[in-house]
Amino acid sequence: MQHFPIFLDLAGRRVVLSGGGDAALAKLRLLLKTEAHLTVFAADPAPEIENWASQSRLRLVRRAMQPGDTLCAALFYAADEDANEDARTSALARADGALVNIVDNLQDSQFITPAIVDRDPVTVAIGTEGAAPVLARAIKADLEAKLPATLGPLARIGKAFRKMAEALPMGRARREFWADYYFRTGPTAIATGEDGAREALDELLLRHLDAKNRPGHVAFVGAGPGDPELLTLKARRALDEADVVIYDRLISAEILELARREATLIDVGKEAYGPSTPQETINALIVEHAQKGAQVVRLKSGDSTVFGRLDEEIEACDAASVSWHIVPGITAASAAVAAIGQSLTKRQRNASVRLLTGHDMKGFADHDWATLARPGEVAAIYMGKRSARFIQGRLIMHGADRTTPVTVIENASRPDQRILSTTLDALPTDLADANLSGPALTFYGLASRAASAALPALQQELA
Ligand code: SAH
């Protein structure tokens, strides 16, 4: 970050601008929104500038700038539309100690003016370090469309009410009051005018003062396979409201970013074969925070009901009389099958699909191999990397066709997703060669659409 964004208090400060044409007008329209004392030096000012001068909104000096004209100025804008004149005036201003901006000359400017979304007192400043003004404009247009025009008055009325809201205890109670005002009650109330919004605030405060403190609660939230865009709206909302987020190893950083900045994030990541937080400790943590009154999000990858040891955590909540609910997520099998362009079930191929785990607490997991070995069966194997040879052996022993397609999808839905197309026969060796380090889902009985199109040359293809 070369340019550090700050909001400067210009009330009563001196700001000087040199120039009287279009570049000057564009900057002045912005500067006139502030409470700065504006002085414009222009030998030939545009009529708008003359107008503003006659309304005393700025001081107009009808000549070129001279040494000493920028004394005590906080900011100086060179808007001369002439490189030589810009260089001359900005040198004068620099000598007087003002911070200098030269319009359309990032290189020689000491500060830049961002693209601004103005919902005063809510102001959004967008900068791209001069890299992409088009992008800044697009973001600005996007935000303009998103932020209701009433946001300004809402925030102004809200600001005047801050002292009153201190009747609520600091922390969650106060946060919920303001969230209620800005996102629910306020926007409706202000439709009837600013007085309406003020009255709504009084009522809202009474309601929140009356409301008993919300007791702690646990949401078991499926975070999906990793792509933040595959979070459900409910998962996003739960993250928005969480006081405590207890998350697993597979939760991506982009998703954790979505938690409130004040939320406590607790990593209880479990390595499949490495050091791990014991399940009892996780259960105890969940219960402990909920009993203190926190809104707890227990964030698990994929869907929390699939190989997530969810029941143990639910039982711990029940035993402690802590309320809970489940927010479903997109399980790895769904993301992985999408990645290979197939469906999990298909008429005349398979009317059922199994979700298997490669290993359980006792070691390699046993399954109904005889059924799985029949042609057309499809299984989504979770945690199946290390047990690949075991699974292959069992299936072949029970008569499975060695040429049955097998597809391994690593990091499904993530930018580093990889697809390994192989067969039951070649699975263990291909897997060892591919050296996958991320979470991987193995489909037994499903080829990726690209690989099945290339049949019969169905062989290792590492994408
Ligand atoms: N509850 C999770 C599964 C947890 S078990 C779910 O519904 O997806 C962990 C296993 O899930 C991993 O070993 C891997 O087999 C699979 N997995 C999780 N995320 C994955 C991803 N992005 N790509 C491929 N497999 C994934």
Image (tube, rainbow, N blue to C red):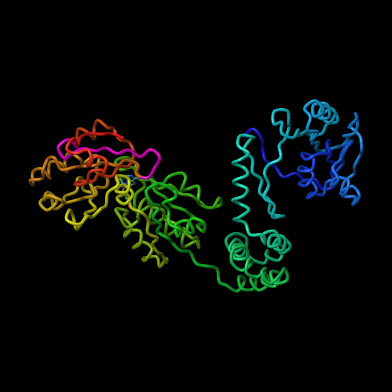
The question of residue 418 being in magenta is answered with yes
- The tally of labels here is 0
Q: Which residues are magenta?
A: 413-427
Residue 301 at x, y = what percent? 37, 50
The question of residue 187 being in magenta is answered with no
The quadrant in which residue 435 appears is top left
**Is residue 36 shown above or below 173?**
above
* Front residue of this view, candidates 232 and 320: 232
* Front residue of this view, candidates 202 and 71: 71
The quadrant in which residue 318 appears is bottom left
* Front residue of this view, candidates 298 and 379: 379
Residue 125 at x, y = what percent? 66, 45
Q: With 325 as the anchor, is 198 left or right in this view?
A: right
Give the quarter of the figure containing the N terminus: top right
Q: With 207 as the anchor, is 388 left or right in this view?
A: left
Q: With 99 as the anchor, is 430 left or right in this view?
A: left
Give the quarter of the figure containing the C terminus: top left
Residue 117 at x, y = what percent? 67, 50
Q: Residue at x 10, y 45 (%)?
A: 400
Q: With 189 as the anchor, is 341 left or right in this view?
A: left
Residue 21 at x, y = what percent? 81, 39
Q: Residue at x 85, y 28 (%)?
A: 92
**Is residue 236 shown above or below 445?**
below
